[in-house]
Amino acid sequence: MPTVKNEEAPKPRHDDETPLETAARLRAEFGVELSKQAHEPLPRSVYDELSGES
């Protein structure tokens, strides 16, 4: 099985950008726009329901 030398391997993108920057880049790349509601955190009750706690 052939191997790739370290200097030839692509650098991981996460070294160059933060998760927020990655998300923004991908939204721009795929033409996705967030609504105002998407910027609001979900209420705790939603997470409690998902985890089975009430």
Image (tube, rainbow, N blue to C red):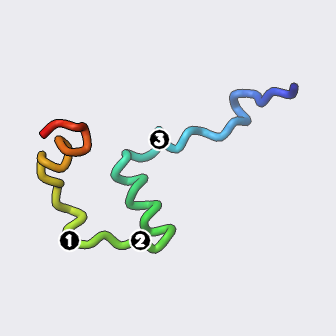
Viewer-closest of 22 and 48:
48
Label 1 environment density (alpha carbons within 10 Å; few <14, some 14–19, many ≥20): few
Label 3 environment density (alpha carbons within 10 Å; few <14, some 14–19, many ≥20): few
Q: Say what secondary structure mark 2 lies in.
A: loop
What whole-number distance in Å separates the C-alpha atoms at marks 1 and 3?
27 Å
Q: Say what secondary structure mark 3 lies in.
A: helix
Q: Residue at x 86, y 28 (%)?
A: 2
What whole-number distance in Å separates the C-alpha atoms at marks 2 and 1?
13 Å
Q: Residue at x 17, y 54 (%)?
A: 42
Q: Quadrant of residue 33?
A: bottom left
Question: Which is in the foreground here, disc 1 or disc 3?
Answer: 1
Q: Amino acid at mark 1?
A: Lys
Q: Amino acid at mark 3?
A: His
Residue labelled with disc 1: 36
- The correct choice, above or below, for 23 with respect to 37 in the image is above
Q: Quadrant of residue 18?
A: top left
- The correct choice, above or below, for 43 with respect to 51 in the image is below
Which mark is drawn over residue 32?
2
Would residue 10 appear left or right of 22 to someone viewing this image?
A: right
Label 2 environment density (alpha carbons within 10 Å; few <14, some 14–19, many ≥20): few
Which mark is drawn over residue 14?
3
Assess whether mark 2 and mark 3 are in contact (beta carbons under 8 angstroms). no
